[in-house]
Every structure is written in C-alpha cells, then in structure tokens.
C-alpha cells in the first residue's frame, strides 16, 4: 500500500490533545474524536469520519438540513457514517426510516420541493434501485419541468460500487447510471478530503446531488490539510484533481480506483518505465473534461479506470468526449478503458479478484499503451 | 417456456441436491400416529377460521422434524465458526432460533409447492433438498457449492426453492409470479413467499398482495416476524405490527413460529386454502433470531441480553419439540442424544468435504451470464485483452 493508503493508525499525541483541550475545549472535543495524527504530526482522518464531520458541520450550519435513511439513527448507521448524529441533533433531524426506499426517497424529494435540505442515505446504492424513479423522474427533472418554479436541494448518498464478498446483487457501480441523467450532479470521492468537501458541497448545492461513496474506503485514513479541517471547506463540484503530475501518460480514475492508479503510477515510476499523471475525477457529472484534455495534450496518452461495467460507462464517455475534442489530434495511442469485468459480481474470492481493476491490471495496460503508436 | 421445473440446476454438482422425494416427510401409512394438542395461543386469525389445535402426525415425522432442526442448528453453528475463521466472506445471515419455520413448512408441503425467501436462506435450502456440504461449500465460495461458488451466503437455489434473494422485499412479487405460473399451468400447488417484519413495509409487498387477490393466485405470504429488521424493532418500522392483518382484503393467521407443529398445522391449512381456490393467504410466524442480523452485528445494542436469554430458555423450538417427543413417548432421551451426535458428525463431515473442495475454475467467471452464451460472441474482462470469447 502506498503511503497515502495507510490503514487507520491512531497515534495520539497527548501533548497536542491537551494543548487543544486547554485552548478550545469545545472544538477540541469535536475534532479530537475524529482525528488521529500521523508520525509527521499532520492530521489524519478516515473517510468515514470525514463524511461524519461534513454531515455534522452542515447540520449545525443549517437547520433545514436533516438526515434520513435506514438505521442512520439509533444504530448509528449500518457503516457507522452517521455515528453520534442522533445524540447531537435528536430524532427530528436524524430519522430512522422503514425499509421502504421508494417511499422515503420520494418523501425526501417532496420535502426538498417544500424547502428542506434532506440528506437521503441509502444503506448502499444497490438498494436505491428501488427508488431510482424518484431520483431520476422526480428529483432530477422537476426544476426543468416546472420552468424553474420548483427547487430540489437534496443530497442522495451511500456506499457505491463493489464491496468485498457480497456477490452480484450487492456489488455494482452506479456512476454511469446517474451520470447520464441531466438535472443530477454526481460526485464520487476517493479520499477523506474529497469525501468531506464534496459532501458539504452537495448539501449546499441547490440541485439534487448523488454522492457515490465507497464502503471499502470508509476505514482508510488520509491526511487532512489545515484548510480541509475548517467548517468552511468545500470541494467544488465539477472539478477534477490532479493527484500526481506526470508527462508520459494520463490515468483518469474515480473513487477507490484512484488509489490503484496512484499505486500503478508509483510502481512504474520506480521501475523507470514512465511518469504517469493521475487525475482523480471527483465529479462524474458535470465531468471536468477540460482538465483531462489539458493533460492529454501534454502526455499524448490516456487510460481510464473505473469499477463499473465497461459498456456505456464513465470511461466510454471520456473516450467519446476526447474523440470530439482537440485532444484527439494529440493522441499517440488509442485510449484504453480499465473497468469492472462485463459480468455480474461473483462471490468466490478467486473469481471476484478478476472482476474489478487493481494496481497490476492498470500497470499492465499503461505499459502496453506506452508501447503503442497510432498508425504503427 | 413456462414449466414448473424451469430452474435448470443440471449444472449443479449432482450431489448437491437430493431429489425431494427422498427427503420429504409425506406421512407414510404407518399407524404410529399421535395426536397432539397445540397450546391455546398458537394461532390468531383474521377473516378466516383458525386451524384445528389438534395435530395428527406420525412419530416418524416428528423424529424427522427433530433431526432436521438439530442438523440446521449445527450447520449454522458451523457457518458461524467458518465465518469467524475468516473462511466465509461478506454477509452471512444465520437462522438460528428460527428453525421451526423452515422445518414445519416443509413437512406440510410437497415438491410441487414452491418457496422463495430473502438472504436468510441456509435452512430453507437444506429443507428443500440442498445438501449440507453444498451449502457450506457455497459459503466458502467453492466449486462444490450449490451455486458453484458464484452466489455465496445469500444466493442458494434448488428445483423447488427460488432462493436466496438479496434485495429486501423483491422476492415477494417474484413469489406471486411463481404462483401465477402454477395457476397458469394448472398445477395444484402453492407458492410460499417469505419476508421479514422489516421487509413487510416495502411497497412491492403490497403490490404483490393486490395482484394475488385480484387474480386469486395460490400465493401464501409468510411474514417471518423475528421482531427486528437489522437494528430496528418492529414497532419502530411498522405502523401496524399485526403483520397477519396487513393484507387487508387477504385473510391472515398469526402462528407461534417457535413451535414446529403449529407451523406445520398452519402451513397445511394455508396450502389447502390456496389450492382449493380461495386465493391468497397471509401467515405471520412469530419467531426470534438468536444471533445478530448478520455476522458483523453483535445483536446486542438494540435489545437486551435478557430478552435473548429469555427466548432461548422459554421458547426454543428444538427444546419445545424435545419435550413433546418425550411426553408422547416418541423416542427416548438416549435416542435423542444419538440423533444429536449423528447430526454433529454429519455436519462436521460436511465441513471437511466443503473445505476440501477447490475454488471454482477461473473460466467459470464468464459462464451462465446468459442461458446460451453462444448467442453472445464475447464479453469483456477488465481490459480489452481479458475479453472472453465463447
Ligand atoms: C432494498 C433493500 N434495502 C435494504 C437492504 C439492507 N438490509 C438487508 S437485511 C435488512 C433488514 C431486513 O429485516 P427483516 O425484513 O425483518 O428480515 P430479517 O433480517 O429479520 O430476517 C436490511 C435493511 C437490502 N438488502 N435491500
Ligand atoms: Mg426481521
């Protein structure tokens, strides 16, 4: 694992804690609960805690923000993302729903029409398929259909994509599904800063926003910058981030795949193969194609990486937009998509390991793409 | 093609499923019948008569009920151990405490009747003919698994059991559809669709009720009320916790689901009801899960340890049947101990067999996505060079 992907190591430095408690006890308690310190003294936070902070801060900032979903309250969230929020905000604003996705999602959308700012949690996005009509037909389209008369400031969130060993019905990526819908914004965070900044931006956004988290990332710690710790921190929706600069090839990824892409890039750089530029999409819709175009014009090669299915996927869309852009003339090799395999997710570990991209596949494809030349 | 044998399981390791005829408890004509009176509170009815409290049943069948419940509990204990040993991945939902439901149902049904349930499916898979080895091997993700290792804990099927479904509530209209096919094909049989107290609130459950009544389908909707859906107590999820009354225009029965004989009696009644053309019926099985929702849930944050202990000590389905077997001189305590021991041996052996099975062949990754993959020329893997050509 790269240094950026360390498992949460809670190294508390008592002196730091005490100093903070003395100077600002309220803030200290709120922050110290979620932070840990890496050996360099920087602050680290798990993706789970980053999401939890985002929810807490936005609920403090705006009375109209409320959270609903299955097990979000008394159980503290099926994956503990909403831990402690019921205690802090009470049952009016943290609402345990029955298992009725279509119903509670529709209800949340209705409350957004009427001026509230719901955060509608799906235990996983697999279950939101029960409610996709309300997301697509009600939330995404009403502002337009009403000639701008109705607003729908709602956030839909939950874990998306493959989890581990849960088979076909519980392991799939919905980025392409929601990414194709006009009226929706769709974000897909990778690390803790993404998670906090994008969720806060989603809650503040006056439009319906789909936040595609990843269960396998919840427990991973990442450094948090000073700015990211602030309650004013947001990550602009619609902007990709260059996670690593490079000159020889561009790797575009979102969610968990960003970590694999970075690992592959580091590996190839160590081996002296290439300097790859890694772009973390952050946002699926709007898609920041400009950042990708600029990068491709510099590196002349492109590989896309995602956990979703290949056909009509995020990578397919990026390929198409690159074809339609001036970056096409700068390509030295055909673009290649690394994706989830075109199969329902199998349970058995050995089969599952061939179903989703990992560092090795990305490195292999990058190397092959470097060796190809258009027309050659 | 609509055929009652539509599920094509020929590809499953031949050993995985015992033809039901060898395993059903169709009462033999042996005159060793006993007549047992159920407790007064065993049933509560809604817009229908309650079944008789007097159960006529052969001693042989009672013994088989006992054996099935003991094996089932052993099997789930083995799953628990395998999960803790990290040999089972992902979700794993055990039915410990709820054995009487699957066992009592089976004794009242034939292979023509169909069952469908959600993810808490190991016990039903066993009762509907799945071998212990094939169930455990599925949990381990092995070749000998009943779904070839592709489905895991939540997805197991046999010719008269339609799974093993992961999306809460989705199995209920599917079950209505299976009963639709039975009616269409003129089969004198019923389909039993199981769902939890949590699942009972899904809209599609009510949609299925409506169609089943409208078209008088031989559908029995069975709510396994184990008092919690994950960490949510029934009264926090459901405006009306009398689940047997929630069909409105569909009559219902509440059943003591911790008593295998009450379950047997109610299911026999429900089968007769539906097959005789009276349309659908609702059953609410009052039951209890001893463990957490799944292996990752300790199951103690939303209910007290005392409550669990109380259910175990006073309502355990195996203990309850044991007492009856002794009371009616069906078998002796020694014979019962021998059954317990044999169950342990059988499950232990199945664990070893399952562990000995290899992982599925990697070429299975691309099989069974379509019925005849030949019609599809290729499917892509993670990158173009991993494309599989049929
Ligand atoms: C549509 C959908 N929503 C949520 C889930 C997650 N989930 C799995 S089981 C479960 C609780 C179901 O409770 P209940 O119906 O009472 O069945 P039990 O587990 O008690 O047998 C939930 C919320 C799911 N699998 N599918
Ligand atoms: Mg339940």
Image: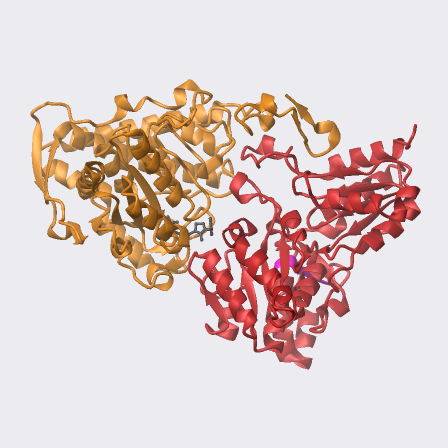
Chain colours: A red, B orange
Question: In the rendered image, which quarter is residue B7 located in?
Answer: top left
Q: Nearer the viewer, residue B217 or A338?
A: B217
Q: Is residue A47 magenta?
A: yes
Q: Is residue B69 magenta?
A: no
Answer left or right for B43 relative to A48. left
Where residue A47 sits: x, y (%)? Answer: 65, 58
Where residue A243 sits: x, y (%)? Answer: 81, 53
Q: Furthest-top residue in view? A: B14
Where residue B79 sits: x, y (%)? Answer: 42, 37
- Residue A348 to residue B219: above or below: above
Q: Going 65% across and 59% down the picture, which residue do you hit?
A: A184
Q: Furthest-bottom residue in view? A: A23
The quadrant of the image that shows the C terminus of chain B is top right
Where residue B173 sits: x, y (%)? Answer: 39, 44
Q: Nearer the viewer, residue B269 or A52?
A: B269
Answer left or right for B66 relative to A368. left
- Residue A356 to residue A228: above or below: above
Question: In the rendered image, which quarter is residue B239 located in?
Answer: bottom left
The answer to whether one can see residue A33 in this image is no
Q: Going 83% across and 46% down the picture, which residue do you hit?
A: A322
Tell me the magenta residue range: A43-49
Q: Nearer the viewer, residue B319 or A248?
A: A248
């Amino acid at each position: 694992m790269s240094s950026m992907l360390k498992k949460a190591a809670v190294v508390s430095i008592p002196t730091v804690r005490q100093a903070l408690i003395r100077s600002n006890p309220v803030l200290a308690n709120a922050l110290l609960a979620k932070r840990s310190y890496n050996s360099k003294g920087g602050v680290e936070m798990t993706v789970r805690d980053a999401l939890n902070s985002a929810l807490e801060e936005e609920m403090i900032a705006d009375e109209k923000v409320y959270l609903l979903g299955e097990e979000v309250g008394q159980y503290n969230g099926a994956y503990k993302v909403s831990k402690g929020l019921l205690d802090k905000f009470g049952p009016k604003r943290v609402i345990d729903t029955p298992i009725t996705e279509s119903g509670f999602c529709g209800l949340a959308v209705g409350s957004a029409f009427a001026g509230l700012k719901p955060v509608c949690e799906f235990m996983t996005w697999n279950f939101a398929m029960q409610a996709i009509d309300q997301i697509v037909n009600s939330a995404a389209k009403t502002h337009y259909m009403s000639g701008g008369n109705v607003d729908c400031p709602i956030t839909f969130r939950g874990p998306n994509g493959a989890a581990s060993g849960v088979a076909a019905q519980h392991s799939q990526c919905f980025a392409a599904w929601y990414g194709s819908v006009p009226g929706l914004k769709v974000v897909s965070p990778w690390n803790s800063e993404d998670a906090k900044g994008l969720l806060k931006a989603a809650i503040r956004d006056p439009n319906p926003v789909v936040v595609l988290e990843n269960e396998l990332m919840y427990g991973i710690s990442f450094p948090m910058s000073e700015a990211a710790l602030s309650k004013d921190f947001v990550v602009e929706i619609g902007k990709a981030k260059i996670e690593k600069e490079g000159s020889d090839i561009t790797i575009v990824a979102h969610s968990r795949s960003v970590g694999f892409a970075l690992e592959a890039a580091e590996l190839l750089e160590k081996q002296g193969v290439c300097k790859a530029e890694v772009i973390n999409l952050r946002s699926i819709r709007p898609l920041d194609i400009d950042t990708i175009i600029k990068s491709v014009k510099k590196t002349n090669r492109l590989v896309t990486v995602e956990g979703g299915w290949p056909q009509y996927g995020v990578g397919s869309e990026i390929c198409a937009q690159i074809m339609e852009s001036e970056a096409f003339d700068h390509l030295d090799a055909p673009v290649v998509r690394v994706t989830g395999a075109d199969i329902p997710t199998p349970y058995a570990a050995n089969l599952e390991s061939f179903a989703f991209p990992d560092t090795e596949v990305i490195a292999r494809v990058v190397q092959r793409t470097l060796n190809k030349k258009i027309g050659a | 093609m609509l055929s009652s044998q539509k599920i094509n399981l020929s590809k499953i390791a031949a050993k995985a499923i015992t033809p039901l005829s060898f395993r059903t408890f169709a009462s033999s004509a042996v005159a060793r019948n006993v007549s047992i009176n159920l407790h007064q509170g065993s049933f509560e009815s809604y817009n229908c008569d309650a079944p008789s409290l007097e159960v006529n049943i052969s001693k042989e069948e009672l013994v088989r009920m006992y054996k099935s419940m003991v094996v089932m509990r052993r099997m789930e204990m083995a799953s628990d151990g395998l999960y803790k040993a990290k040999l089972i991945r992902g979700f794993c939902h055990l039915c410990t405490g709820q054995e009487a439901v699957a066992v009592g149902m089976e004794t009242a049904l034939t292979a023509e009747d169909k069952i469908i349930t959600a993810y808490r499916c190991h016990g039903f898979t066993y009762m509907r003919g799945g071998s212990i080895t094939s169930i455990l091997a599925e949990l381990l993700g092995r070749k000998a698994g009943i779904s070839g290792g592709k489905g895991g804990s939540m997805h197991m099927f046999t010719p008269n059991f339609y799974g093993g479904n992961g999306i809460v509530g989705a199995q209920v209209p599917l079950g209505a559809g299976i009963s639709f096919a039975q009616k269409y094909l003129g089969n004198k049989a019923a389909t039993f669709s199981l769902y939890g107290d949590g699942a009972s609130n899904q809209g599609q459950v009510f949609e299925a009720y409506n169609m089943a009544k409208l078209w008088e389908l031989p559908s029995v909707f069975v709510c396994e009320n184990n008092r919690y859906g994950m960490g949510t107590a029934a009264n926090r999820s459901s405006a009306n916790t009398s689940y047997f009354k929630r069909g409105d225009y569909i009559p219902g029965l509440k059943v003591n689901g911790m008593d295998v004989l009450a379950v047997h009696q109610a299911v026999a009644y429900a089968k007769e009801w539906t097959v005789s053309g009276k349309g659908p019926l609702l059953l609410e099985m009052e039951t209890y899960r001893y463990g957490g929702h799944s292996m990752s849930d300790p199951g103690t944050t939303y209910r007290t340890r005392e409550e669990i202990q109380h259910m175990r000590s006073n309502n355990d389905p195996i203990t309850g049947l044991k007492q009856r077997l002794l009371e009616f001189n069906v078998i002796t305590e020694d014979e019962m101990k021998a059954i317990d021991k044999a169950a342990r041996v059988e499950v232990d052996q199945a664990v070893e067999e399952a562990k000995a099975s290899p992982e599925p062949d990697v070429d299975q990754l691309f099989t069974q996505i379509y019925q005849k993959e030949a019609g599809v020329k290729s499917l892509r893997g993670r990158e173009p060079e991993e494309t599989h050509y049929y």
